[in-house]
Structure formats: C-alpha cells, structure tokens
Amino acid sequence: MNHLKRYLGILWIALAPVAIYYLIKTAASEIAAKPVIDTKIQWGVFVIIFIPIAFGLALFGYFALKGEYDHLPERSDEISD
C-alpha cells in the first residue's frame, strides 16, 4: 500500500500543473467568446481560487512521494509534534 501511495504522489504532482493549464486555457477561450466584464470577473475568480488548491494538490503529492503518509497514527497518543 505504501508503494501505491508513492506512485499516486507522482500522479498528484503531475496533475496539478495540467489542471491549471486547462483551467487557464478554458478561461481564455470563454473570455474570448464572450468578452463582457461579468465573464472576466467570473473566470478570474475561478482561476485565483483554484491555483492555491492545485498547489496544495502538488504539495500533497510531494509528501506522499516523500513517504510522509507511510504510517498513519491509529490512536491520539501516537501523534507527535
């Protein structure tokens, strides 16, 4: 299972920039199709909100690849800072 977590970490790292690329590509095409201020604001908000989410996805993948999720605590006394 730990190997699967690490392989999926690579997938999450690769998925984040691909998702940002397609989001920006879609936003540009939608704004070009209907260049009114409402469309620009809507897609601007979508892009601004999604970029940190995609960064978090890549960060999650990095930690999975690094092996941080190999042992998950089962009880609260196993948690250490």
Image (cartoon, rainbow, N blue to C red):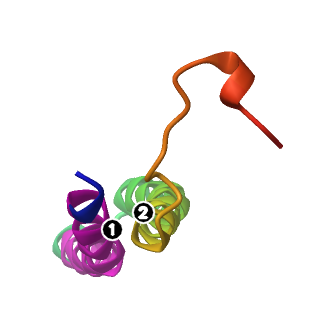
> Dividing the picture into quarters, in which one does residue 7 lie?
bottom left
Left or right of residue 17: residue 45: right
- Pointer 1 with pointer 2, Cβ within 8 A: yes
* Three-letter amino acid code of the residue under disc 2: Ala
Name the residue: 43% across, 64% down. 54
Q: Is residue 13 magenta?
A: yes
Dividing the image into 4 quarters, which one contains the C terminus? top right
44 or 60, nearer to the observer: 60
Query: Residue 71: within the magenta?
Result: no
Q: Residue at x 42, y 55 (%)?
A: 46
Q: Which mark is residue 50?
A: none
Number of numbered discs visible in the structure rendering: 2
Q: Is residue 74 above or below residue 55?
A: above
Disc 2 secondary structure class: helix
| N-term mark: 1 or 2 | 1
> Which residue matches tag 1?
9
At 21% from the left and 69% from the top, the residue drawn is 30
Q: Is residue 70 left or right of residue 15?
A: right
Relative to 2, say whether 16 is above or below. Answer: below
Residue 74 coordinates in the image, percent (x, y): 52, 23
For mark 2, what is the residue?
Answer: 64
Viewer-closest of 8 and 72:
72
Main SS, magenta region, reads helix
SS class of the residue under badge 1?
helix
10 Å crowding of disc 2: few (<14), some (14-19), many (20+): many
- Residue numbers of the magenta segment: 4-31
Q: Looking at the image, which is closer to me, 26 or 60? A: 60
Q: Nearer the viewer, residue 29 or 49?
A: 49
Question: Residue 15, image x and y in percent?
Answer: 26, 72
Amino acid at pointer 1? Gly
Residue at coordinates 60% horizontally, 18% vertically from top-left? 75
> How packed is label 1: few (under 14 Cα within 10 Å), some, or many (20 or more)?
many
